[in-house]
Image: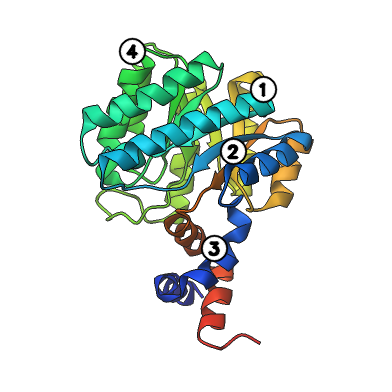
Amino acid sequence: MELLNKLIVKTIPLVPKPLVRRASSRYIAGDKIADAVRVVRELNQRGMMATLDILGEHISRREEATATADEYVHALETIDREKLDSNVSIKLTAFGLKLDFDFCLENVRRVVARAQALGNFVRIDMEDSSCTTDTLRMYEMLRKEYSNVGTVIQAYMRRAILDIRQLLSNGAPTNIRLCKGIYVEPRNIAFKNRELINKNFTFLLNELLRRGAYVGIATHDERLVWDGVRLVDELKLPKTVYEFQMLLGVDEELRDFIVNSGHRLRVYVPFGRQWYAYSVRRLQENPQIAGYVVQNFFGLGK
């Protein structure tokens, strides 16, 4: 079965975009910010927070990066105007990281400054390993100026514990989303064994919580949710110093269990026209849905 899943995952990039879009619609709010507002409002009414992600990454022109920053400022102002319980998540490659670090920093700084003025928060997403060092460097620089910025640590990265200890070493408030990691990386950079990744996730979570970081526990793995609940109970932590985080459209039953148990939960709500790369990653993460897509593409579905 694992071999079949790997084959299905590799086949997804061959599937026509319209079919990918149809299959991945559950993971994306829509093309426009109005779609995202509708989804976030529904989540808020069900007792959940949100984070907005404007889809798009790896831009090639400076004007695209500037436009991305403009879109995020508009999103923050929309959140404020609509009185939504939501922050924003950004990808540095959409802000020009691969073009010029300082140019990217200025674009991000503009968004973080506007968020701070509105009493909101910006999460700097982690991308593939080629971006890790620069992402953490930018986070370190920004948190010296602003208190409303956080980043992401991926548990499958071998360097993760060293990065966490470095971030915690200077005494500054640390806000981390901890997730497993989804990008394809070589073995010398990332753990490949699922059990080992899970163990490292719990190890890193323990380190972060014990040392006073605010943690977004981002997982759809119920075993890791249980580990998180156990740790916060063991450490007698108030619910204000952590939250669970899940992706839109993934295991809504588990999502409801977490909220109904009295824990805070934030849903990652992506929207925008640049949906393809994100959709492929989501389908590759879920071979059952990906298999349905592939079967229909090759005319094997019923």
Q: Toward the viewer: 122 or 217?
A: 122
Please state which amino acid type lies under the numbered disc 4: Asn
Query: In the image as oriented, which residue stretches furthest toward the left?
Result: 100
Q: Which residue is drawn at 43% across and 25% down?
A: 111
Per the image, the residue denoted by label 1 is 239
User: Could you tell me residue 293's position as x and y percent?
Assistant: 55, 74
> Are the two marked residues, 3 and 1, in contact with CB atoms closer than 8 angstroms?
no
Is residue 236 shown above or below 285? above
Callout 1: SS: helix
Q: Toward the viewer: 248 or 163?
A: 248
Is residue 102 shown above or below 252? above
Mark sitting on residue 245? 2
Q: In which quarter of the image is residue 139?
A: top left
Mark sitting on residue 170? 4
Q: Residue at x 52, y 23 (%)?
A: 121
The alpha-carbon separation of the residues under discs 3 and 2 comes to: 18 Å
> Are the two marked residues, 4 and 3, in contact with CB atoms closer than 8 angstroms?
no
Nearer-N-terminus badge (1/2) = 1
Please state which amino acid type lies under the numbered disc 3: Asn
The alpha-carbon separation of the residues under discs 4 and 2 comes to: 26 Å
For label 3, count other residues whose C-alpha is less than 10 Å away and answer few (under 14), some (14-19) or many (20+).
Answer: some
